[in-house]
Every structure is written in C-alpha cells, then in structure tokens.
Amino acid sequence: MRQNLRTSAIAMLAAAAFWHCGGGMKIIDKPISFSQTRIDLSRDYIRAHYGLEVQNIEITPRIIVLHWTAVDDFDRCFAIFNREQLEGSRPDLQGAGQVNVGIHFLVSRQGEVHRLMPETWMARHCIGINHASIGVENVGGQNSIDNMTDEQIRANIELVRYLAKKYPTIEYLIGHYEYREFEGHPLWLEKDDSYRTEKVDPGERFMNAVRRGVADLGLKGVAEIRAEKGRSDDQD
C-alpha cells in the first residue's frame, strides 16, 4: 500500500510539465528524488523528533511557512533539495537525523512556482512544525540580504491563496524567522530542546507584503499564535 502510494504520487507529479489551477495559476511540476529510503528516513525523523510511530508521511496541512533559500541560483537550490540525505552538507543540522531538507514549492526569481513533492507529504523544512506545514522556498536571500523580487511576492500571494482554498485545514501563515513562536503551542512537537536554528528568512518586508495580499483570508500569524498559547497556559 505504501509503495503504491509513493509510486502513484510521484508519477502524478512527473506526468505533466505544468498545469493551471482554477484561478489561472501555473504550477510547474519538478519532482525531487523521493525513494523509499527518503520515506523511511522521514519516518525515522518523525519518530525521533515528534515521538510518533507512523505508517506513512502524510500530513494534514495547518500552516504555510515561507522561506528564502540563501542561494540565488535556481539550479543550485534544486540540487540541494534533490539530495535524499544530508551527507554532511549542513553542520547546523547534524545530530538531527539523516533525511535531507525538503520543500513542497520552490519559487524562482522570475516568480515561477515549481512543485517539488506532493503537498500532503511531510518535508523537513521547519523545526517543530514539519508535521503540519507546507513549505515554500524562494530563490534568493544569499548572505542574508533581502533581494526578494516583486514577481516572487506576487507568486507567493497567489500560491497562498491556492493552498488555502485547496486545504481548508490551513489556519496559519508564517515566515521561517517566526517559527519559534509555535514553541509551547499545541502544534509544536519537537522533543529535543537543544535543536533550534536562528532564521531571518524571508524577511519582514516580504512577509508584510504577502500578508497584505492575502489579508482577506484571515490566516493567523504571530499575534494569534501568542494568544492561543496564552489560552492554553490558562487551561493548564
């Protein structure tokens, strides 16, 4: 069953060069390598970091996390995500399992949206909330410089709208630099208190612009996350 699911999902992604969403959005399918080894390593990650035993790596999306890649070249970014194992390339992530970082969407500097893996499979892209989040990487941000383009802002607005419509379970929209706001929240599952990384991506300017563009969707951000943690503490 699990093998059939993996095969059919990858075949679906590879079948078309691109397709248009209902609102006219174009998504280019460009699958990264996702063998049974990567699936098994992802399950190992879920066991070690979330304390969960799972039969597959399917998720129910609750959160959209926007990133920048810190690399300004699209092909280099794709090559990074295409590797299935870390292979010593990320010293800051050592000791946290061997499944490589992954992402659901990669947006080029021209605003082209590429889907790298099924939207409802877990990708390792954001500590503590991978199990409930869809990740969107934007090519750029090298040397921690905000060089996000207007085309990327527009593409992210359109993509967030697409995802929120497709998955009514999505409630939150955050930038990667805001992920630690979820610590202490019911959706936070990271078991290793020492496993954290400091992030600045994709920058406040970018997040403010995207949030303005999707304000009518009512997606929750930092203020709402803090309020929910406060109510949870009161109940405890």
Image (cartoon, rainbow, N blue to C red):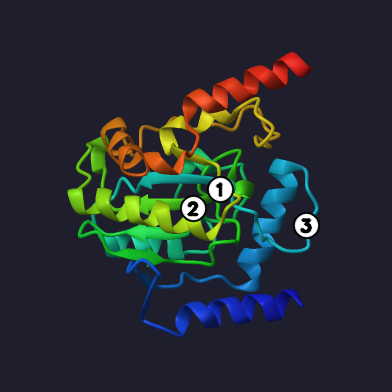
Could you tell me if the residues under marks 2 and 3 are in contact, i.e. CB atoms within 8 Å? no
User: Looking at the image, which is closer to me, 101 or 60?
Assistant: 60
Q: Position of residue 12 (x, y in %)?
A: 52, 80
- State which quarter of the image contains the C terminus: top right
Q: Is residue 102 visible?
A: no
Q: Quarter of the image holding residue 234?
A: top right
Q: Which residue lies most toward the bottom here?
A: 15
Q: Is residue 167 left or right of residue 162?
A: right
Mark identifier at residue 54: 3
Dot 2 or dot 3, earlier in sequence: 3
Mark 2 or mark 3, which is nearer to you?
2
* Type of amino acid under label 1: Ile
For mark 2, does the 10 Å Cα neighbourhood hold few (<14), some (14 to 19), or many (20 or more) residues?
many
Q: Is residue 136 left or right of residue 180?
A: left
* Type of amino acid under label 3: Val
Query: Is 233 drawn above or below residue 83 in the view shown?
Result: above
Q: Is residue 22 visible?
A: yes
For the residues labelled 2 and 1, the Cα–Cα distance comes to: 6 Å
Identify the residue position indicated by label 2 in the image: 164
Could you tell me if the residues under marks 2 and 1 are in contact, i.e. CB atoms within 8 Å? yes
Secondary-structure class at tag 1: loop
User: Looking at the image, which is closer to me, 11 or 236?
Assistant: 236
For mark 3, does the 10 Å Cα neighbourhood hold few (<14), some (14 to 19), or many (20 or more) residues?
few
Identify the residue position indicated by label 1 in the image: 170
For mark 1, does the 10 Å Cα neighbourhood hold few (<14), some (14 to 19), or many (20 or more) residues?
many
Q: Position of residue 114 (x, y in %)?
A: 36, 66
* Type of amino acid under label 2: Ala
Taking the spot 67% from the left edge, 76% from the top edge, the residue there is 5
